[in-house]
Amino acid sequence: MAEIINMPRLSDTMEEGTVATWFKKVGDTINEGDILAEIETDKATMEFEAFYAGELLHIGIQEGGTAPVDTLLAIIGEKGEDISAHLNGGAASEEKEVAAAKKVEEVSNEKVALPDNVEIITMPRLSDTMEEGTVASWLKKVGDEVAEGDILAEIETDKATMEFESFYNGTLLHVGIQEGESAPVDSVLAIIGAKDADVKAAIASLESAPAPVTEAPKETTSVAPPKTETPKPVASTPVAAPAVVNTNGRVIASPLAKKLAEEKGINLSSVAGTGDGGRIIKRDIENYQPSVGGGVRPFVPSGVESVEEVANSQMRKTIAKRLAGSKFTAPHYYLGVEFDMDNAIAFRAQFNSIPDTKISFNDIVVKATALALKKHPQVNSRWHDDKIVKHNHVHMGVAVAVEDGLVVPVVKFADEQSLPQIGTQVRDYAGRARDKKLTPAEMDGSTFTISNLGMFGIQEFTSIINQPNSAILSVGAIVQKPVVKNGQIVVGNMMKLTLACDHRSVDGATGSQFLQTLQQYIENPLTMLL
């Protein structure tokens, strides 16, 4: 399927780029990682590499041409693929982009001029789908000297945590987004300038500037860093002290404390505040014990209620958005099977007896699934409103659990790789995924996905389809259980798998036939080597 390449934002202030040189021409074969062109930004001329493999079908900006960020730069796809829809739609889009760029320029001209000795650093767009970023850590603090090329901060995007370097020399005068906070792309990240620069004037000029004429991102609320509220033990003999009131005679309390007090039927005037200046806060309501007459001591529970609030990471937000979109748009149905793993166990033991060779059952499942998909391209497909695209290549997404959620690195051309090659690549991806070192290109382009929870002892589960794929395979643990073989009850090694399908593109019979082929490979693994 054709992949659209847009003019990238290669610096934090880049609004448009110029194609200095094309290293490929239309019709050339492109490999992932090939240098496509040299792009001249407002700061430097930089090489721009391809994240996709295929044929260069179209060049949207010729050498010497200049265009705004996100303008169509090129199209990569399969040889002879029809890209007319992208080109016809692109003309209107380009006109809109040019108009939008003019509007932005007009607004920029209206801004209050910044002091000459300061540079504004904004939240960069570090991936093609990034709408906002989170500052994972600052490597410089206010007052530090910064040289061009120094790493300023680590920015967490929707795909990975990436280092962000400075393009300027000077002193770090202001930090606009604190560690753990999130903000939309182009928000003020920092100010760098001369040590004696008027930072207040720079900030005031930014605040007085008109709002940018762009579509607001869906999530623009800054998220505070994770906080753990330390619960305060209940006093053994609670005493109600007078509440603090303001000059109007109203009790000083936080909005949350007022809401909790109303829900619990507590009179705020009888609650002692422990916040700043005697302000009543949440824990005062939670720990409040009314006085009891007649000399009877109230029951004081020994336990303490506590909660921990953890801000949603960019990864967690993206997972929620994508999986909710998949579940609510794709009509899922599920096909469950159970495979006999006796031959696979013996095959793996023999394979691993070869020196310096080690494969896992997951590697066997990945290879067998890739070969089965080659025979059933309808399962290896993508749904569009006007067509179904069947992939003739197999790019296998392998779900990997990480601290913040789940990532899906992609084993490209899995059907063509050997079992040891698949094993090496999956282990490498899993290790770098947990360290947040995967690149966006390594997580892009899957045609089918496998999720394996067998190593956690999970016997059977269902997964949500990783769109735009049409199906996902859930793999459980190998379990010993009684089975009937040749009319005798014996101990068997069985593994349950569940195929979730998008009914728009994969019918029940198609999914069933795919699982039958998969069973043949897994229960007779030597056939994968023929």
Image: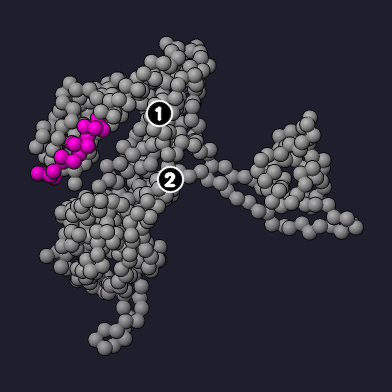
Residue type highlighted by circle 2 = Lys
137 above or below 330?
Answer: above
Q: Which residues are magenta?
A: 78-94
- Report x, y in % for residue 63: 16, 24
Q: Main secondary structure of the magenta part?
A: helix
Assess disc 2: are there few (<14), some (14-19) or many (≥20) residues with their C-alpha within 10 Å of its C-alpha: few
Identity of the residue drawn at 74% across and 33% down: 277
Judge from the rendering whether residue 66 lies leftward or rightward of residue 282; answer left or right.
left
Q: Quadrant of residue 363?
A: bottom left
Q: Residue furthest bottom?
A: 487
Residue name at image x 12 percent, y 44 percent: 81
* Residue 434 shows up from this direction: yes
Residue 426 point in image, percent of width and height: 28, 53
Residue 18 picture location, percent across and down = 22, 23
Q: Is residue 117 magenta?
A: no
SS under mark 1: loop
Q: State the CA–CA distance, disc 2 to disc 1.
A: 19 Å
Q: Amino acid at mark 1?
A: Asp
Assess whether residue 86 is covered by the magenta stretch.
Answer: yes
| Residue position marked by numbered label 2 in the rendering | 317
Mark 2 secondary-structure assignment: helix
Say which residue label 1 marks.
186
Nearer to me, 96 or 266: 96
